[in-house]
Amino acid sequence: MGITPVHFFSHGSTRMLEADTESGAYWTKCGQEALAHNVKGIVIMGAHWACLGDKIEVATNPAPGKSFCPFSSPALYKDWKPNPDIPTAERCISMLKAEGFNAGPNPDFTWIHDTFMVLIRMFPDYNKCPPVTIVSMNARYDPYYHVKVGATLRPLRKEGYLLIGTGGAVHNLYRNAWTNMLLYRESLGQERPPEAWALNFRQATEDVVTKNRGPALRKAMIRLMQHPAYREAQATDDHWMPALFAAGAVGDWEDEADPNVLAAETWELVNMANSQFTFGRYKDDTGNKFVGREERESEKLPRPRMVTAAA
Ligand SMILES: [Fe+2]
């Protein structure tokens, strides 16, 4: 194992567990790739768990339950058993503390659908799910803080851990069209186009991710919070912080060598863009040669173009 990619998955509504979507198929593909590359474990930040004050916690419950996942059949998740990774959780706490975070364990944490919905799609057979470490957000929703969390845990990628943020590219529950969901448990029928703010922010996100690499990616992802459509696209900051965690985890100079892609997308409830991004790629020790910054420049490969958040 050389280094792993990083994913930012937009988990969308809880229908995304049951509905057959391009995004769900991509999550499955990512799970298969993870197994093919023998990933050591999953380290994941969701959008539904944040700690108060300056705290950040890592889940250390050895036998966690799962919260209710409305609008999808319980048969799809009730018997799927979590595979928590307590040793890696303790290690993450140590790594975070060493960087000055007020980090600690949470031995009572119950898994929430922002993480297990994606993991079930990735690893339908729970016996094949690699050990999972869930890291909380901080409820002050400081973008620099969450980038630093990703940067702090980035070295785990070189040991074969797969880092994932699960939130939403355009995720404003107050501006979604809920009628069909409430009446028919249906979220995919786009009876009218998304509103302009949703389209604009979705496009800005794609541009920033695909046209920036390394430290420039971190800065551009943070800068998206100043985009004119940000507050409409993200009514609250909780579904954006996992994207910043992902950017932190893949925003080193070394990461300039690899492209970031928008790999799949599913619109739901008229205005919710469930964009699935993958940063970097698997590089096995015997496979693809790592191309560092100096090598890349000596080979005169093109520099990634900077794109502003408002572009
Ligand atoms: Fe969510």
Image: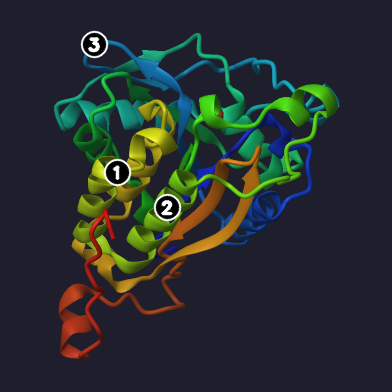
The amino acid type, in three-letter code, at marker 3 is: Gly
Q: Residue at x 50, y 62 (%)?
A: 262
Query: Dot 2: within a 10 Å radius of its alpha carbon, few (fewer than 14), some, or many (20 or more) residues?
Result: some
Do the residues bearing badges 2 and 3 touch, measured as CB atoms within 8 Å?
Answer: no
Secondary structure of the residue carrying tag 2 is: helix
Q: CA distance from mark 2 to mark 3?
A: 33 Å
**Is the residue indicated by label 1 positioned so its CB lies within 8 Å of ligand 1?**
no
Secondary element at image label 3:
loop
Picture quarter with the C terminus: bottom left
In this rendering, is residue 188 above or below 74? below
Residue ID for mark 3: 53
Q: Nearer the viewer, residue 15 or 57?
A: 15
In front: label 2 or label 3 = 2
Residues marked 2 and 1 touching at CB (< 8 Å): yes
Describe residue 295's horizontal placement relative to residue 169 as left or right.
left
Q: Residue at x 65, y 34 (%)?
A: 117
Quarter occupied by residue 191: top right
Q: Amino acid at mark 2?
A: Asn
Q: Residue 35: image x %, image y %?
A: 62, 55
- How many marks can you see? 3
Residue nearest the viewer, comparing 41 with 258: 258
Determine which residue is flagged by label 1.
Answer: 228
Please name the residue that numbered disc 2 is placed on: 200
**Mark 3 and 1 residues: CB-CB less than 8 Å, in contact?**
no
Q: Residue furthest bottom?
A: 299
Q: Residue at x 53, y 30 (%)?
A: 175
Position of the N terminus, as image quadrant, is bottom left
